[in-house]
Image (cartoon, rainbow, N blue to C red):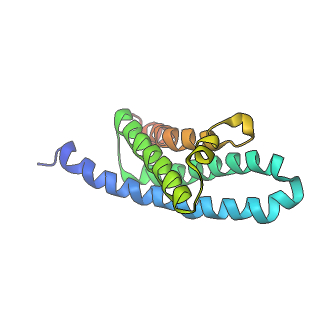
């Protein structure tokens, strides 16, 4: 007999593979910002637009891939979002510190008053599985 405790660990592994898809999307988004948007719009407008675009990419990746993982309760969708959010923040700080960024500089990215909408990216990462899970529930008639 299969119980949720036996299935959920495999679901965690699958959800990590979805999260890994965010990494190339973020790298491409950063390249788009640095090499195209900054030149067209200037850094002041390119930075928030980049945050909005990355949030959209995360949502679209989740929208298309997450429902394929099977049925999840709302609680499991939220737990997945928490996991993704934790992994995102950990990845951002680890890669930033490895590149020599100061801790204060990394924290500044969470202040939307600076024009950086990184907090929107983090919130999108948290909420995308919940929203995609609601899509799955509507299709299944749940």
* Image location (x, y in percent) of residue 101: 60, 55
* Image location (x, y in percent) of residue 87: 44, 50
The residue shown at (39%, 53%) is 15
* Image location (x, y in percent) of residue 27: 62, 63
The residue shown at (35%, 41%) is 72
86 vs 26: above or below: above
Q: Quadrant of residue 5?
A: top left
The residue shown at (57%, 63%) is 99
Quadrant assignment for the C terminus:
top left
Q: Is residue 1 left or right of residue 98?
A: left
The residue shown at (15%, 48%) is 2
Q: Residue furthest left?
A: 1
Q: Nearer the viewer, residue 134 or 82?
A: 82
Q: Residue furthest right?
A: 40
Q: Is residue 125 left or right of residue 73?
A: right
Q: Is residue 109 left or right of residue 1?
A: right
**Residue 22 appears anywhere in the view:** no
**Residue 103 appears anywhere in the view:** yes
């Amino acid at each position: 007999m299969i119980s949720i405790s036996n299935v959920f660990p495999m679901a965690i592994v699958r959800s990590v593979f979805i999260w890994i898809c965010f990494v190339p999307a973020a790298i491409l988004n950063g390249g788009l910002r640095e090499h195209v948007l900054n030149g067209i719009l200037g850094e002041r407008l390119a930075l928030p637009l980049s945050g909005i675009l990355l949030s959209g990419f995360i949502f679209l990746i989740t929208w298309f891939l997450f429902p394929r993982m099977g049925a999840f309760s709302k609680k499991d969708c939220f737990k997945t979002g928490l996991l993704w959010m934790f992994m995102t923040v950990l990845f951002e700080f680890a890669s930033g510190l490895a590149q020599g960024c100061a801790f204060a500089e990394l924290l500044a990215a969470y202040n939307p008053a600076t024009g950086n909408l990184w907090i929107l990216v983090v919130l999108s990462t948290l909420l995308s599985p919940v929203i995609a899970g609601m899509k799955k529930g509507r299709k299944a008639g749940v």
